[in-house]
Image (cartoon, grey):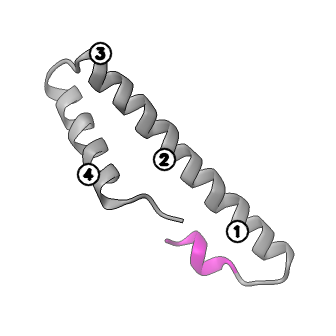
Amino acid sequence: MTAPADKSERMHVLVEKQQWEWLTDSEKQEAALLSHFFNRVMLVRAKAAVLLKERGHDVDQLLNS
C-alpha cells in the first residue's frame, strides 16, 4: 500500500506553504486529514511487514523502501 501521487503532492504543497505563510483553516484541516491518512498507510505497511516476517518471508527489501 502506498499513498497516491496526488495526495503526496498536495501534502508537499501544504507543507511548503506553511513554511512561507499561514494556512487557512480549511488547509489546516486538509493537512491534518492527509497526515492521518499517511500515518495510516505507514501503520498498515508496518503491520504487513510484521505478518510477512512472522510467516517466514524475507522483509529486508521492504524495510529499505
Is the residue under label 2 in contact with that under label 4 (CB below 8 Å)? no
Give amino acid for label 1.
Ala
Q: Which residue is mark 2?
A: 38
Give amino acid for label 4.
Glu
Tell me which numbered mark, 3 or 2, is placed earlier along the sequence.
Answer: 3
Q: Quadrant of the N terminus?
A: bottom right
Q: Quadrant of residue 17?
A: top left
Is the residue under label 3 in contact with that under label 1 (CB below 8 Å)? no
Magenta extent: 59-65
Q: Secondary structure at mark 1?
A: helix
Q: Which residue is mark 3?
A: 25
* Tag nearer the camera, 3 or 2: 3
Q: Which mark is residue 9?
A: 4
Whole-percent x, y for residue 18 in the image: 23, 27
Whole-percent x, y for residue 23 in the image: 23, 21
Q: Which residue is mark 1?
A: 49
Tell me which numbered mark, 3 or 4, is placed earlier along the sequence.
Answer: 4
Q: Gap between marks 1 and 3, in whole Å?
A: 36 Å
Give amino acid for label 3.
Asp
